[in-house]
Image: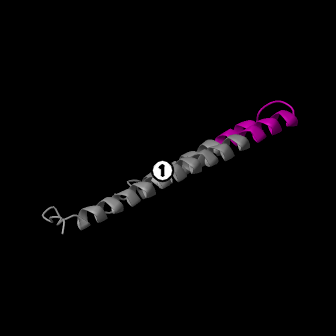
Amino acid sequence: MTKPPPSRNTTAYFVQAILSFAISTVSVVVAIAYLPGDAWMRGLLGLGLLYVVTSTFTLAKCVRDHQESASVVSRVDQVRLERLLAEHDPFRTTSNT
């Protein structure tokens, strides 16, 4: 049985993604904090930012779960096919006696 290819994401890519997310989130929070206007306006924008961030994490989790379930089904199908091929003998003849 062959193993699925390993993930191609390197540690540097993972760190870059985390830093990009952190910098963008902090910069928007700072921009909201220094925004001229009432506190309720800044609070509403902050709440909107929180909603966008949490829904982004939820969407990313759903996409990851969908990809993982597809790979599990693919692996199960591959194991079934390998078992059928291992049990198949093309030179076996069936006798009707």
Circle 1 SS class: helix
Local crowd size for mark 1, using a 10 Å CA cut-off: few (<14), some (14–19), many (≥20): few
User: Image quadrant of residue 28?
Assistant: top right
Magenta stretch encompasses residue 85: no
Q: Nearer the viewer, residue 80 or 8?
A: 80
Query: Measuring 54% from the left and 47% from the top, which residue is drawn there?
Result: 63
Amino acid type at circle 1 is Gln
Query: Measuring 14% from the left and 64% from the top, which residue is drawn there?
Result: 93
In the current view of this chain or complex, which residue is farthest to the front? 97
Q: Is residue 83 visible?
A: yes
Q: Quick one: quadrant of the C terminus?
A: bottom left
User: Image quadrant of residue 76?
Assistant: bottom left
Horizontal and vertical percent position of residue 47: 77, 41
In the current view of this chain or complex, which residue is farthest to the bottom? 97
Q: Is residue 14 left or right of residue 35?
A: left
Q: Quick one: quadrant of the N terminus?
A: bottom left
User: Image quadrant of residue 90?
Assistant: bottom left
Q: Is residue 91 left or right of residue 52?
A: left
Residue named by callout 1: 67
Horizontal and vertical percent position of residue 60: 57, 47
Q: Is residue 1 visible?
A: no
* Span shown in magenta: 27-49
